[in-house]
Amino acid sequence: MGVEQGRPAHVVVIGGGPAGLTAAWELLRHEVKVTVLERAPSAGGLGGTTVFEGQAGQYRFDYGGHRFITHNPDLLALVEELVGDDLLTAERKSVIRLGGRTYAYPLALGNLVRTAPTAMLAGAVRDLLLLPFRRPRQEPDDFAGWISSRFGPTLYRTFFEGYTAKLWGLNPRQLSADWAEQRISLVDLKDVVRRLLPGAANNPRTYARSYRYPKYGFGMIFDRLAAFVADNGGEIRSGVSVTGLVHRKGHISAVKTTAGEIACDAVISSVPLPDMVKLTGGKSKLRFRGLRFLNMPMAMDNVSDCTWQYLSDPDMMATRLQEPRRRSPFMAPQGMTSIMLEIPCDPGDRLWKMQDEALFELAMADLRRLGVDTGKATGECFSTYAPYAYPLMSVGYQKEREKAFVHLDQFDNLVQCGRQGTFRYLFTDTAMEMGQMAARGLVVGAEGSRWRRQVYDHRNERTVIETQSVA
């Protein structure tokens, strides 16, 4: 039974992350049989939490700096129902570390004047005066041009150039301006100045200080969601990889896996978009940026009072330092804390392949530069990996993304969703909403490809989503 022929009886969901599990939940609500396939040993994807049994007890580490923020009351109600009283409210505090200095984030006038070098402040003032004369006639399509045209060369070189190159592994002039448009809440240098004036609101409009967070790590949401799926008749098969699709005349009838073939009426997939294109006989140049997380216990109550610290020095290996217990005190044993370093690299890179012990020594050197008492490190450490952490939004990626969807449009009963599946750097609530939309589209028997495009571009307006840069 195809999508255009009515409601499918059995849907295979490929990928057990936030989007896939929410899609499965929505399908079960409509009494559709569901089989979820997850390549990893357990569900959760990038929304999962790893438990580490240390010498002093249990530590918990997420795959990155997650927090649950949504304007969707139904989605919030679902998460509150799943997590219950274990859903805490936390306050976010972030700083920028650069050149041995600590800057408040978002920028605050008193801190900036006290902290920034005189030359940098003078350069920013000069750029402000020259800004009207430097505005390009055409809107820059690259990150470096977009930032420089709005913030001036001084702030670009200081806060953006080195950090961005380290994060993405390419020259900022090769990065699409889309990244800046959806990540930087301030419009231009004049906006920065206005917000720094006494009496102005220092909080950028997308910087959410308060957020919801589960007591035992972000993965609690998806552990509970996976349990709900299993308890209500859905099947979750972990440790299973998809090797191909059985299809004829644009209609998928089965999914090939390392555990055998599974017949189905439709497929919802959060498989990385370029991988799905290749899995179905096409070609794609789209790429992702990977992250390696180095996790380590610390024999102290707190490393700092910051949820995370942006490490903007280009010669430091990590881009962010996080302390999990800043989100929940239950992420480490009593009297202990932990550190998670986010290290951008790709599978096969030197930093990706390096042994934990060697990486630990490099991390200790950087932590000492940051003023962390490395004598409190217990010596324990382990790594987790996210090879598809960020879609690499290089200049011109939009055409390649559209080409991928045109290729997949040939299948009437396949829909992609989620961060990797739609090649979007989006937040958890949007990924979950995409899963719901994909499931509903199949349930109502939506015709053509337009409904799928609505899934792919859900909340893809050219406005700020949530502040991620060091602006």
Image (cartoon, rainbow, N blue to C red):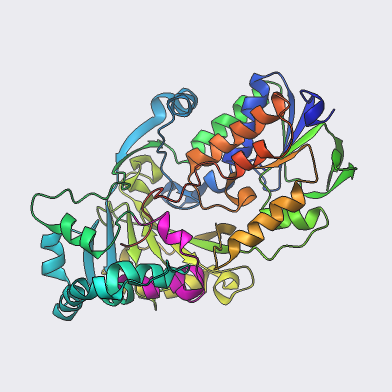
x and y percentages locating residue 168 in the rendered image: 50, 69
| Residue that protrudes farthest toward the left in the picture | 198
Residue at the right extreme? 248
Q: Is residue 297 left or right of residue 291?
A: left
**Side of 79 where 243 appears, left or right:** right
The quadrant of the rendering that contains the C terminus is bottom left
Q: Residue at x 11, y 68 (%)?
A: 114
Residue 361 appearing in the image? no
Q: Report the side of 69 relative to 300 (left or right).
A: right
Look at the image and say whether residue 159 sits in the magenta stretch: yes
Q: Is residue 175 above or below residue 431?
A: below
- Principal secondary structure, stretch drawn in magenta: helix
Residue 407 within the segment the image draws in magenta? no
Which residue is drawn at the image coordinates 21% and 62% (left, top)?
Answer: 190
Relative depth, front residue between 340 and 254: 254
The image quarter containing residue 211 is top left
Q: Spot the residue most to the front.
A: 137
Which residues lie in the magenta part?
158-184
The x and y percentages for residue 122 are: 15, 78
> Can residue 335 be seen in this snapshot?
yes
Q: Nearer the viewer, residue 135 or 105?
A: 135
What residue is shown at x 55% (from left), y 30% (from top)? 224
Which residue: 39% across, 76% down?
314
Total residue callouts: 0
